[in-house]
Image (cartoon, helix red, strand yellow):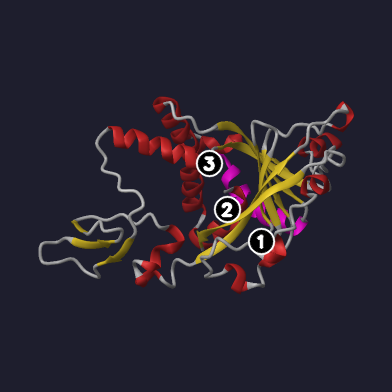
Amino acid sequence: MYGHASRFISRHGVEATAEIVKYEISHLRIIADVIEREKIDCDFTLTRSLDVYFDKDVMDKVLRGVEPLLSDSYQQGKYAFMKDAVIRFPTAEQPLSEDDLKETKVKGAKGYVSFQAGHIWPYKFISGLLEIAVSKGLNLQTNTLVLEISPSRDVEGFWKVTTGNNRGSIRAKKLILASNAYTSALAPEYVKAIIPCKGLCCHIVVPSAADEKKRPPPLENTYVTRHGSGAGGYLIPRPDGSMIVGGASHTFTPLLEQWHNNPDDGVLIDIAKEYFDGYMQRTFVGWEDSGAYSKEVWTGGKSC
């Protein structure tokens, strides 16, 4: 959220931007509390995120967004969360030290922002919530395709929902569409507002090293790497030492037909599917001889 602050400020002002950042950060504690209270097994880990930068122009833009949020008026009360952010960008008066760069473990890093974050296995989390809800009486109808929603409420104020799989139709006063990128299939009025856009992600594993000298240094933080011109990616370490890595959008952005308004997640994005081969060796110090390789690559729909 710190990386996008300058854009939010230009659109909505500093006060609204501070509210957006506070809103996003508050979810970390709320989700952690729910998981602890309900005892949901979903690999939730509290950690820190490192947003690592390589481009001065990009860092300057980030600073323009972050500096107003670091002023005295946003360092107390409901905005005290901003004190958690650690910003290490080079300036003429204070260049980055070798220790600063070693902190990132990323080759060629020019600066970084660090802040508290978390990572989670989302499917396990949602499954855990559903299990709790069903135990409390939720009527969950799985594998029930919604074919159509009536374009307007009837005289009694009900929506009509037509389903498949011989499940018939239902009437409801309120509907929630949790269909993300595919919403316009049921609500055509959103066809220009919510568009399916494919991304790419992979699972990188590290072979067991017989030689301790070849064992790469562990990565405990989550990462976002931000190059210029929109290039970058993200990384989440798994408890078993493997990595979930995504991004590479800069490799396929011009190829609109492969990702923009394309809901087919059964087909990989051709130009990017080899991008993660050797990713760890290229990106992280000490991983050159790790043998890390991309075991699975997949794509999926999101909205944009």
Q: Marks 3 and 2, how far apart in space?
A: 14 Å
Task: Report the residue at 31% width, 36% height from top.
Answer: 133
Task: Report the residue at 30% width, 37% height from top.
Answer: 134
Q: Marks 3 and 1, how far apart in space?
A: 34 Å
Q: In the rendered structure, which disc, 2 or 1, sits on the residue that comes first in sequence?
A: 2
Task: Report the residue at 67% width, 35% height from top.
Answer: 221
Q: Secondary structure at mark 1?
A: helix
Write down the residue under mark 1.
249
The three-letter amino acid code for the residue at tag 1 is Ser
User: What x and y, as percent, mark residue 155?
Assistant: 10, 66
Residue placed furthest toward the front: 166
Residue 58 within the magenta-colored segment of the rendering: yes
Foreground disc of the pair 2, 1: 1
Q: Quadrant of residue 132?
A: top left
Is 204 placed left or right of 74 in the picture? right
Prevalent SS, magenta region:
helix
Write down the residue under mark 3.
74
Is 115 placed left or right of 31 in the picture? right
Q: Are marks 2 and 1 in contact (CB under 8 Å)?
A: no
User: What x and y, as percent, mark residue 278?
Assistant: 80, 49
- Front residue of 146/184: it is 146
The three-letter amino acid code for the residue at tag 2 is Ala
